[in-house]
Image (cartoon, rainbow, N blue to C red):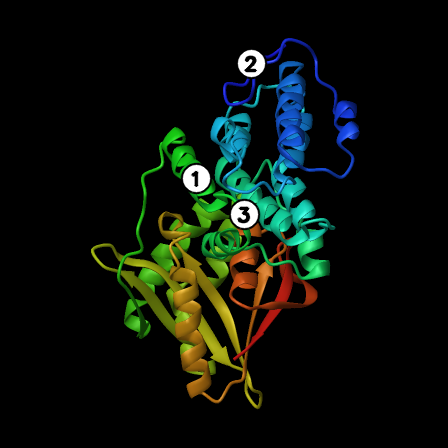
């Protein structure tokens, strides 16, 4: 059904997963090659999801870097990436992103830790390649089990520490190749400052709010709810009233040579040790560059100056990107909160908290 996968061995007959049972618990070079051949076989039969499973089995082999088979058939990160990039319409691929999330968090022996971080490395490839709206994370598991989806630096460090071969090199090269295939230009984090503002600059928050919400929230809430919430909470007079009546802080996130790329607001709850973050939004063009973490660190510093010991915020239950960022930043789930905001709309959120 499919032309041969160019990064897997050519075969002259069908290979079946049952043939791998003969290896028992042995995970040597012959097992590794057989897993690759099985992956090629099911790929050609139009079964990409099963090909992924076969390559997972190849990654369960803890081969040393000196093993000759790795020179011929490198660790299959690029083979997996190629498969996701060239997935044919109408052929079942499942949800690789969720698959590797589950695999990484439910791994068993043997070689549990190495296999866990190889699964997270594959998960990261899926996150880079597959659109999140079509291939979402398992937010229920993240919520119930407190899963933290790791960042690039964490995965790289664990591969470097655990790999008996050259996982980090092959995975990093695969990521760079994927970005080239997808036409993505490498980005570096700009110099950034977070600056408290007064009422006279709230029009900039209003402008950014409209741009960011219309860019980020379709698919999470309806366009009608986006417009309604902007009309309620982003009037400059309403924001100025928050400043005067509740001592709400507003700040802009400014990047060198770009100007304001985001904003936030927060307030100290009277008589408590909690600073609540009402707003924290960044333009999509700077997502993934560490600006969110920097802004949260700045906010934590101001909160401590105000005598707070905890940060809290609410995040829409379907906003997987924000949830991932807050979990990485140390926020835990407190409770589910659903609030009627009028005109038939509700805010269906997680309340999250971080000690500072």
Task: Report which residue position mark 2 lands on.
Answer: 4
Q: Secondary structure at mark 2?
A: loop
Q: Which mark is residue 280?
A: none
Alpha carbon of mark 1 to alpha carbon of mark 3: how far? Answer: 20 Å
Q: Which quadrant would the N terminus be assigned to in this image?
A: top right
Give the label, 3 or 2, closer to the camera.
Answer: 3
The reply, left or right, for residue 172 in relation to residue 75 is left
Alpha carbon of mark 3 to alpha carbon of mark 2: how far? Answer: 30 Å
Measured as percent of width and height from the top left, residue 89 is found at 59, 19
Foreground pick, 10 / 271: 10
Mark nearer the N terminus (1 vs 2): 2
Mark nearer the N terminus (3 vs 2): 2
Count neighbours of disc 2 (C-alpha within 10 A) and say few if under 14, some if 14 to 19, many if 20 or more. some
Residue at 61% from the left image edge and 20% from the top image edge: 40
Measured as percent of width and height from the top left, residue 347 is found at 62, 58
Task: Name above or below for residue 171 compared with residue 304.
Answer: above
Task: Name above or below for residue 15 compared with residue 113.
Answer: above
- Residue 183: image quadrant is top left
The reply, left or right, for residue 182 in relation to residue 123 is left
Mark nearer the N terminus (1 vs 3): 3
Measured as percent of width and height from the top left, residue 149 is found at 58, 54
In this orientation, does residue 55 appear? Answer: yes
In this orientation, does residue 241 appear? Answer: no
Foreground pick, 144 / 6: 6
Task: Report which residue position mark 1 lands on.
Answer: 175
Residue at 53% from the left image edge and 42% from the top image edge: 127
- Are discs 1 and 2 less than 8 Å apart at CB? no
Task: Report which residue position mark 3 lands on.
Answer: 164
Q: Secondary structure at mark 3?
A: loop
């Amino acid at each position: 059904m499919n032309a041969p996968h160019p990064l897997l061995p050519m075969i002259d007959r069908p290979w079946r997963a049952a043939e791998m049972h003969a290896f028992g618990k042995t995970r040597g070079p012959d097992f590794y090659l057989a897993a690759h051949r099985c992956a090629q076989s099911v790929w050609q039969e139009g079964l990409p999801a099963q090909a992924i499973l076969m390559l997972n089995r190849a990654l369960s082999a803890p081969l040393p870097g000196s093993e000759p088979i790795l020179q011929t058939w490198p660790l299959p990160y690029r083979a997996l990436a190629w498969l996701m990039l060239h997935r044919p319409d109408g052929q079942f691929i499942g949800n690789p992103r969720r698959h590797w999330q589950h695999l990484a968090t439910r791994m068993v022996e043997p070689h549990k830790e190495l296999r866990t971080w190889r699964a997270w490395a594959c998960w990261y490839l899926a996150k880079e390649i597959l659109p999140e709206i079509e291939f979402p994370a398992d937010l229920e598991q993240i919520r119930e089990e407190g899963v933290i989806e790791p960042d690039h630096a964490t995965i790289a460090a664990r591969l470097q520490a655990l790999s008996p071969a050259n996982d980090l090199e092959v995975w990093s090269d695969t990521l760079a190749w994927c970005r080239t295939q997808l036409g993505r230009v490498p980005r570096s984090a700009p110099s950034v400052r977070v600056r408290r503002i007064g009422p006279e600059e709230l029009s900039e928050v209003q402008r950014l709010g409209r741009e960011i919400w219309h860019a980020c929230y379709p698919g999470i809430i309806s366009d009608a709810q986006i417009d309604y919430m902007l009309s309620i909470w982003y009037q400059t007079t309403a924001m100025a009233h928050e400043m005067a009546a509740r001592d709400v802080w507003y700040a802009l996130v400014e990047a060198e040579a770009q100007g304001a790329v985001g904003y936030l607001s927060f307030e100290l709850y009277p008589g408590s040790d909690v600073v609540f973050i009402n707003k924290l939004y960044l333009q999509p063009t700077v997502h993934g560059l560490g600006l969110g973490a920097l802004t949260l660190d700045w906010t934590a510093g101001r909160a401590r100056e105000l005598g707070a010991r905890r940060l809290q915020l609410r995040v829409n239950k379907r906003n997987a990107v924000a949830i991932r960022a807050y979990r990485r930043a140390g926020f835990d789930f407190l409770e589910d909160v659903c609030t009627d905001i009028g005109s038939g709309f509700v805010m269906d959120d997680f309340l999250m908290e971080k000690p500072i």
